[in-house]
Amino acid sequence: MTAEIPNPRGLPIVGNALQLPVEGTHQFLADLAARNPGGIFKLNLAGRHVVFVYDPDLVAEVCDESRFVKPIDPPLAHVRDFAGDGLFTARQDEPVWGQAHRILLPAFSQRSMKAYFPQMLEVADKLVAHWSARGAVDVTDDMTRLTLDTITLAGFGQTFDSFDQAELHPFLQAMGRALTEAMNRTRQLPMVTGLKKKADAAYQADIAVMQETVDEVIRTRRTSGVKANDLLGLMLDAADPVTGEKLSDENIRNQVLTFLIAGHETTSGTLSFALHLLLRNPHVLAQAYAEVDRMLPGDTVPTYETIMKLDVIPRILDETLRLLSPIPFIGLASREAGTLGGRYEIPARQKIAVLLRPLHTSSAWDDPEAFDIDRWLPEAKAGHHPHGYKPFGNGERACIGRQFALTEARLALALILQRFAIADPDGHQLHIKQTLTIKPEDFRLRIRPRQEHE
Ligand code: HEM
């Protein structure tokens, strides 16, 4: 027996497009998911039909890579305006995706994480120095400084010195505006986008700023003559073990830009959300303090080995990524016509969006809204639905930087908690800013050095 996929009533021609709010799309979709407990609904966005899934069994189906593939549709098709055929926005059938994936994979091995650790520590120490001189801090901006400087130093051997600048780096400002414009274009008919000449001029100018930053990073490495085994070194010198081909100059530019964006935006959101959730859950914060006091007493300098032995902090990050995943959805498309859940018929090339927060809080989880880090204890993990948690995406197109992000985030959280007592006396109300990712907006913290007061 076939069934209709639930579809909220829309208007003729535009369908549900005008219901989709400009701000807070993720919340609108999460509310719709709550009203459709079957774990699936569809929207007609001015003729673009998208099926949203969040039931773990249905998600298991769409994560079958023999049936579904990552498409480069809007908004990613617009991000491709500046990230080109870099890993994140390359089409699966472009040979350069496989070449770059194979060339860059060694840069994300456990051995590489250990090699990057001194650079990660160098930047995390700058955050500590910056915070030590202040009583109140802008968390999201400083996490952005931290993660941007970490990927540039560890990945490309260069630094933007973000903590020495009052304003965020021009690259970040241009990137923020360009991502917002890419999202705006997703909601516009192409004809409307074509008429907005001023917006287009600003968009092109922002893309130029980002590309100039990237060209400077590549030029600096090339003229230095340094041969390093980091991300940039592999991009410039390594050959694909399968085809023997090296990456073209244009593709290297796209990869560097991709890593500058993908390599910091999500990790900074995760760290900001983690601090927000810790303040809402003081008993977990106390556990985290107890862990750093045990593993990193006094001013002990963290080593890679100590960071890898942490237990509470990694579980805080896992649970943060469950409740507040910085990437709100992952896009897929059916390779052929078929059915979902044995009853929902879908055509070939059907666009699918896996909604991460509704998936991560589905009824497959016990007490899904609770911030409970014990669900990440090994014995509890064994009972998780195998497709109930996807903060890093799926299959071949899953996040290549996962270990990098988790190592960097563990270290940053450990150092922050080793050095500072954190508080938000005004009770921060979570406001979320959404571009391609989500992050807390206007999140300020009160901090004081721990050792002096305890
Ligand atoms: C892809 C999440 C950190 C580089 C992805 C995807 C997700 C994700 C969900 C798949 C997107 C899709 O299917 O369209 C995250 C989260 C992070 C994080 C939650 C932090 C907590 C990083 C870092 C790097 C990175 C630190 C680089 C150092 C990439 C790249 C891709 C990707 C290059 C594209 C992979 C491909 O398609 O081959 N990430 N990411 N990410 N991520 Fe991450």
Image (tube, rainbow, N blue to C red):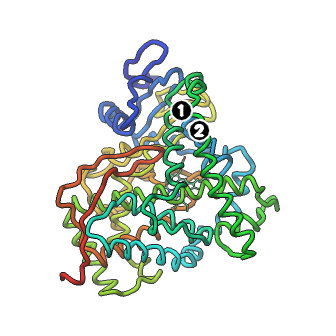
Q: Which amino acid, by three-letter code, is at mark 2? A: His
Q: In which quarter of the image is residue 297?
A: bottom left
Q: Residue 78: give its label.
A: 2
Label 1, label 2: how many angstroms apart (C-alpha)? 7 Å
Graded by Cα atoms within 10 Å as few (under 14), some (14 to 19) or many (20 or more), the crowding at tag 1 reads some
Q: Quadrant of residue 10?
A: top left
Q: Quadrant of the N terminus?
A: top left
In the image, residue 271 lies at what x, y percent? 38, 62
- Vertical comparison of 123 with 71: above or below: below
Residue 137 placement, left or right of 161: left
In terms of secondary structure, where does tag 2 sit? Answer: helix
Q: In which quarter of the image is residue 38?
A: top left
Compare residues 347 and 422 and report the one nearer the observer: 422
Residue 67 visible to an observer of this rendering: no
Q: Residue 193: give its label.
A: none
Determine contact: label 1, label 2, CB under 8 Å.
yes
In terms of secondary structure, where does tag 1 sit? Answer: helix
Q: Residue 185: give its label.
A: 1
- Vertical comparison of 61 with 6: above or below: below
In the image, residue 90 lies at what x, y percent? 66, 46
Residue 234 visible to an observer of this rendering: yes
Mark earlier in primary sequence (1, 2): 2
